[in-house]
Image: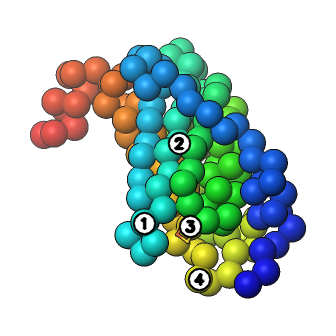
Amino acid sequence: MAYSDKVVDHYENPRNVGTLDKNAQEVGTGLVGAPECGDVMRLQIKVNPDTQVIEDAKFKTFGCGSAIASSSLATEWVKGKTIDEALAISNTEIVKELALPPVKIHCSVLAEDAIRAAIGDWKKKNVGAEELAAAAH
Ligand code: FES
């Protein structure tokens, strides 16, 4: 199967590969796996506490070329966005941007899941206890 030029570009020159300190208050970490193939993706965000803008993002992906390209693209897209804007990113946009074929759609779902998991982790650390209690009722 042929990869699109954009997938090859992200695969050969992945953006934002690396690790942020997962114990830092302003960092959210998402670790997700694809049951279809066993590939694993970790995506981390660093959020400005005052503005809720994502100032940095890093990823590490043990997976296929499309998963690496999807996570590389995801880190590019979330940077500079607020938490709410980043939550609006959907895998279909990734599929479109990278021209992924149907058998590779789950690779983009993994990237969407990783963004959501990273934001969820950040919220757990940073949303006040009262707010969590309020949300539970
Ligand atoms: Fe499973 Fe791509 S083949 S993430």
Q: Is residue 71 left or right of residue 13?
A: left
Q: Nearer the viewer, mark 4 or mark 1?
A: 1
Whether the residue under disc 4 has CB within 8 Å of ligand 1: yes
- Please provide percent x and percent y for residue 34: 43, 65
Question: Please, what is the three-letter code of the amino acid marked with disc 1?
Answer: Gly
Q: Dots 2 and 3: beta carbons under 8 Å?
A: no
Whether the residue under disc 3 has CB within 8 Å of ligand 1: yes
Q: Is residue 36 left or right of residue 63?
A: left
Q: Nearer the viewer, residue 121 or 107?
A: 107
Label 4: how many Cα within 10 Å (few below 14, some 14–19, many 20+): few
User: Label 3 vs label 1: CA separation?
Assistant: 11 Å
Please give the count of numbered marks on the rendered protein: 4
- Residue at image x 81%, y 63%? 8
User: Label 4 vs label 1: CA separation?
Assistant: 15 Å
- Read off the residue under disc 2: 43
Q: Which sits earlier in the primary sequence, circle 4 or circle 1? A: 1
Q: Dots 4 and 3: beta carbons under 8 Å?
A: no
- Residue at image x 45%, y 31%? 28
- Read off the residue under disc 1: 38
- Read off the residue under disc 3: 107
